[in-house]
Amino acid sequence: GVAGFIGSAVAQKLLDLGHRVVGIDNLSTGHLSSIPQGVDFFEMGAHNLEIIELLEKYDFNAIFHIAGQSGGEPSYSDPIYDLQANAQSTLLLLEYLKKSSCKKIIYASTVSVYGEPVNYSSLTEDMPTNPKSLYGTSKLASEQYLRIFAEQFGINCISLRLFNIYGPGQNLDNLQQGMTSIYLSQAIRNKHVLIKGSKKRFRDLVYIDDAVDAFVKMLNDKYTGYHVYNVSKNKKIYVSEIVKEIQDNLPFPITIEYKGSTPGDVLGYTGNFDKLNRASNWFPNIEMNDGIKRMTDWALNKELILNQI
């Protein structure tokens, strides 16, 4: 997933820290221009059988599995691809790790594995998983593969359950994934935001720099066996607040419309990150108003550059 929003940011951080990075992406949603300079890049889907042959040419310390289909709504339009991109890809990487000297994989899981929270309390990693979407189901299947390979084959597996990650670099062309980027893209390009669902829905937003920090901390050798961590901020942010913050940072007025719904959507959730904090001293530092301002400034500049070409 090196050409994607999170994968490219993780790759850049690893390069900055002096690591060599081999990156794989099928460019289904990622862009070549997003891949950091210095990455050894191969265009391939992580669910392709040929990936094992490619990986066997290298000697890795760890694999960051950030590839896959990353949205609830698209999982309904092509559920077979969703299963392949998320679960089959994980199984293939684990099969490689079983034969390799590399014994660590850090997986980008999702809050969607929880489904609709009971009483909308702050989610902890030991709460029941009951996905409402096909996407959440395929990601949960990957978690179970990771657990089994950790217990039975000695592979060190970490699942990071990502809540709503946002920030500069998010794909403004993809209007089916990333709540903040969807609204921001519509606001800038159409000066009108169509919101599918109630304004009372709420999310737990984590800025991209904080999410990258969580991934990189997992390289520590103390993480053996199987671990699951929430990457969250434990703050309830309503949809109406997200749109208002975007609106306040734009140099022009926008209109807002609430209409329809999204399959498999939930009213809301927040996540407790105490477990990750205790394990790695991780803490989400960027507040929503600062993060959306940074993202909006980046997006406005990006659109200005594109429109000048």
Image (cartoon, rainbow, N blue to C red):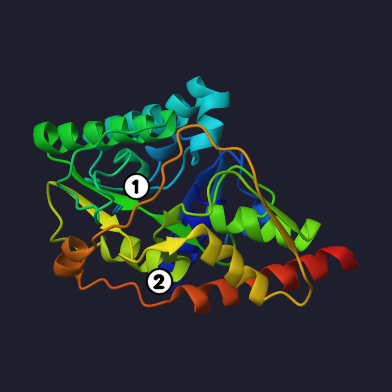
Observer-side mark, 1 or 2, equals 1
As shown in the figure, which amino acid type bears the numbered disc 1?
A: Val
Q: Residue at x 58, y 72 (%)?
A: 245
Percent position (x, y) of residue 179? 55, 53
Image-based side of 273 in relation to 294, left or right: left
The local crowd at label 1, few if under 14, some if 14 to 19, many if 20 or more residues have their Cα within 10 Å, is many
Name the element at disc 1.
Answer: helix
The type of residue carrying mark 2 is Gly
Seen at 15% across and 65% down, the residue is: 279
Q: Could you say where residue 49 lies in the image, as x and y percent from the top left?
A: 44, 24
In the image, residue 136 sits, relative to residue 21, either above or below, namely: above
At x 40%, y 39%, the residue is 55
Q: Which mark is residue 18?
A: 2
Front one among 71 and 37:
71
Q: Quadrant of the C terminus?
A: bottom right
Secondary element at tag 2? loop
Q: Is residue 171 visible?
A: no
Q: In the image as oriented, which residue stretches furthest toward the right?
A: 308
Residue behind mark 1 = 111
Q: Position of residue 150 (x, y in %)?
A: 15, 39
User: Considering only order in the chain, which callout, 2 or 1, is on the residue closer to the N terminus?
Assistant: 2
